[in-house]
Image: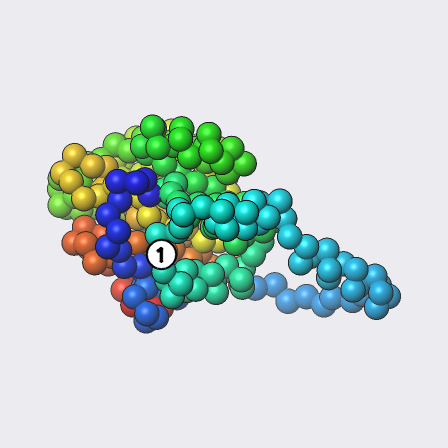
Amino acid sequence: MSNLIPPEKRWIITTVLLAGLVGGALLFTSFLRAADDAFFLCSTASAKSRAVAAASDYAATPIQLQAIVHYATSTVVPQQNMAEISISFNVLKELAPANFLVFGLGRDSLMWASLNPRGKTLFLEEDLEWFQKVTKDSPFLRAHHVRYRTQLQEADKLLRSYKTEPSCFPAKSYLRGNERCKLALTGLPDEFYDTEWDLIMVDAPKGYFAEAPGRMAAIYSAAVMARNRKKPGVTHVFLHDVNRRVEKTFANEFLCRKYRVHY
């Protein structure tokens, strides 16, 4: 999601167990859903105390206020248009506060963090120079630098070879320490592996020249995390640039067409 990313982008919303079509975005839903627990909620709070609690729930958070000031006083705006943002925003409204993982840092990072108030939003960025610039300008963003073990020119070979490596089988795979599977993201901080993500947005790394990391590992790792989900609910995966051959091929292979919600 650096300033090198070309503007022409389409969105694919992937929910690791849901699928269908909404204005330029593709949505899948998770195929591994934990059973929802039935429960009763009883409240003895007075109407006044409930009103106070409700008001506090909707009080603006510091990062939301920061986002308002930033976008109101800057000519730098998010890369997406209103229609594209609305698709993601509608999902966030249903889930927030959520665990939200974003592959890439960009001009829209502050917006995404502010749309998940009181939740955990974590950004991963492969371009070290861009990572240092964004985190210097926005030190309140939670972000990590990530190194990929793949190159875009290896995409076809990786798609063929993963089927012969047991550590890569999506149904059995794991990420932390999985050095045998080149598609598995390794060497990241514990919070990446220990958090069960409700939403995963894949808008990085760069994938438009041969030596670029490509998004093969990001797509694969998103699928593994969604399949390995233990808590109730599903994991939603949003994939950008699905019009490109590699993104489309790996999405069909690992996120699965049958789980698509929007296209």
Answer above or below: position of 253 versus 141. below
On screen, residue 218 versus residue 197, left or right, reads: left
Q: As rendered, which of 146 and 164 lies closer to the eye?
A: 146
From the viewer's side, name the closer residue of 188 and 207: 207
Q: Position of residue 41 (x, y in %)?
A: 74, 66
Label 1 sits on a secondary structure element that is: loop
Residue shown at the point (36%, 60%) measured from the top left: 81
Q: Is residue 185 visible?
A: yes
Residue annotated with mark 1 = 80
Residue 193, image x and y in percent?
Answer: 45, 38
Q: Is residue 131 above or below residue 221?
A: above
Residue 36 spot, x, y in % from top left = 57, 64
Q: Residue at x 47, y 61 (%)?
A: 89
What color scheme is it? rainbow
Mark 1 is surrounded, within 10 Å at the Cα level, by few (under 14), some (14 to 19) or many (20 or more) other residues, namely some
Report x, y in % for residue 173: 34, 43
Amino acid under disc 1: Gln
Q: Looking at the image, which is closer to me, 98 or 167?
A: 98
Q: Quadrant of residue 261?
A: bottom left
